[in-house]
Amino acid sequence: MVLMLIGYAAVAMAEGRVLHLADVERAAQAHQPQLLAARTSTLAAESRVDQAGAALLPQVNATAQYQRKTGNIAANPGTYSPTKSSTSLAPTYDAYNIGVTASQLLYDFGQTRDRIAVAQAGRDVLRSGEKAAELQVVAGVRRAFFVAQAQKAVLAVARENLANQQRHQTQIQGFVKVGTRPDIDLVQAKTNVANAEVGVITAQNNYDGARAQLNQAAGLVGNTDFDVGDEQLPAVAGEEQPLAPLMDKAVVQRPEMEVLSQQKRQQDLQLQLVHHNLWPTIAATAGATEVGITIGGMVPNWNLGAVVTWPIFQGGINKAQVREAQANLQNIAAQESVQVLQIQTDIEQARLAVGAQKATISAAEVADLNAKELLRMAEARYNAGVSSMLELNDTQLAATSAAVQLVTARFNLSMARAQLLAALGLP
């Protein structure tokens, strides 16, 4: 928690506490829990590789045993014993047994090497998944950033609208006082100011909420006492290209395809391991013991040997494991087809959205400029007494709507480009 607070402070130390997109992306890569979880999964997989390789090294175990037991003699069935069996529960004796055993795998027809390779492939799957998680986190941060940026712009429009309505009220109050405008115009102006104040409050609340969502997306702990920067995503290389060349790039770059490729490799190695499990393993063994009824009277022994273990029949488990691995390979092939179709859809939607929003911005800029000019003209006409309060209100509403429309178009373009970057598998 302390480290996260320090990280939050580090990205918000700029004058005025302005968070820029690059700052938030870096913070998310360092603190976002989803990404941290993916990284720890990869670390766990690294440990599984080491676990699989441990079988290649010597295995040494030490034991020490103490017992208090009776010394009754029991005749074994089928053997002659001149001594009668005894059944007394007394006297009892101490018994000590201390031993060390060691074994070393000599040869197993590649079984352990296969297990290591399977574990390494599993680790690589998670590494690729980590890349996919990072892209998802970055995409989520960008979305939250641009939502906050759009809400900030809407708040500016609301404040500008309030300032205009207050200015209108002041002017109309003067006109009513000298008798050039009816009282109803002043009542309408006051209503417009009140509505504009409500609009500012709503926009401010939306901006605060969007900044809280940005904190969550970036994995930051802290308040929303900051502003977001005004930067936009630059044009994506190839955003105006047709679908085919973009698909070629995405199939290579998307980490989801890399995950499936690594999963396929893992299943191939698993299938190879299943076949090798049918062969024997050869190991050398050694041991040393000391046994006795007193610590000072223990008798030493040692042994050397070799063990061959060959699984002749295990109930058909190997055939079932082969079928499982083959089915998994078929499943991965189907997932690859599904992923390719998804990539195609993602790219096509993002590419079309970029083109549409670029055209929309051009039209929205013209509409915003014209709406501001109409408002200026309507204000002049009203001040000259040749237009009504209704005309002034309509042009003010049109100017506000045009400004919001321009904000929305710019937001949508940034989001479309962020979507295209994610579809292409680019950070």
Image (cartoon, rainbow, N blue to C red):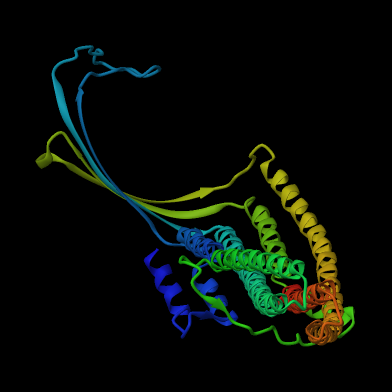
Q: Position of residue 170 (x, y in %)?
A: 66, 78
User: x and y percent of residue 230 in the render?
Assistant: 63, 83
50 or 350, nearer to the observer: 350
Residue lying furthest left: 296
In the rendered image of this protein, does residue 111 appear above or below residue 219? above
Give the quarter of the image for residue 375.
bottom right
State the image quarter where residue 67 is shown: top left
Up the image or down, 214 lies above or below 246; here it is above
Residue 305 lies left or right of residue 139; in this view the side is left
Depth check, front residue: 80 or 341: 341
Q: Position of residue 417 (x, y in %)?
A: 75, 78
The C terminus appears in which quarter of the rendering? bottom right
Residue closest to the far front: 179
Image label count: 0
Residue 253 visible somewhere in the drawing: no
Residue at x-position 72% and y-position 45%: 319
Can see residue 422? yes
Q: Position of residue 66 (x, y in %)?
A: 21, 35
At horizontal 43% and vertical 78% (from top left) the residue drawn is 10
Residue situated in front as seen by the camera: 39 or 390: 390
Quarter of the picture holding the N terminus: bottom left
